Image (cartoon, rainbow, N blue to C red):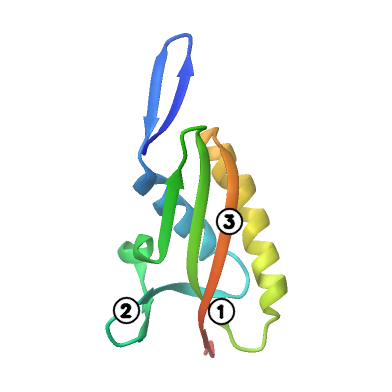
Amino acid sequence: MKGILDNELGRVSIDPEVIAQYAGSTAIECFGIVGMAAVSMKDGLVKLLRGDSLTRGIKVDIDEDNKITIDFHVIVSYGVSINTVSDNLIQNIKYKVSEFTGLEIKKINIFVEGVRVID
């Protein structure tokens, strides 16, 4: 479902893919996040996603009340506190995505799929 904003000049429709792209770009700027992860259900492998395929690690749902739920599948840096990284990611995404879209964030779910050492 698309996000809908109505104003005196008309209607704005926001595709979930646009929100996922923005959220992915915002997430990789957060401290401790190495990148998004794609999980292969067939063999259980986790793959680090780069650049243009960031949205494969993010699922955006918009409900009938125009509230956004975002699922992130991330890979974190070795040696950082997952709790701290998650809190930082949630706060950044909640603020930036709601400012970007004008829609309310209902829930942000973070799935840590792996840990990587950063060179």
**Numbered disc in front, either 1 or 2:** 2
* Residue type, numbered disc 2: Met
| Residue 3 location (% of width, % of height) | 43, 34
Q: Residues within 10 Å of mark 3 (few under 14, many from 20)?
A: some
Task: Tell me the tag on residue 108.
Answer: 3
Q: Residue at x 58, y 82 (%)?
A: 77
| Residue 14 location (% of width, % of height) | 39, 35
Q: Which structural element holds mark 1? A: strand
* Residue type, numbered disc 1: Val
Which residue reaches farthest left?
Answer: 42
Q: Which structural element holds mark 3? A: strand
Task: Tell me the tag on residue 39.
Answer: none
Q: Earlier in the sequence, mark 3 or mark 2?
A: 2
| Residue 65 location (% of width, % of height) | 52, 32
Q: Earlier in the sequence, mark 1 or mark 3?
A: 1
Q: Is residue 26 above or below residue 74?
A: above
Work out how far the residue at label 3 is from the one at label 2, CA to CA, in angstroms.
Answer: 22 Å
Q: Residues within 10 Å of mark 2 (few under 14, many from 20)?
A: few
The residue wearing badge 1 is: 76
Q: Residue at x 47, y 39 (%)?
A: 63
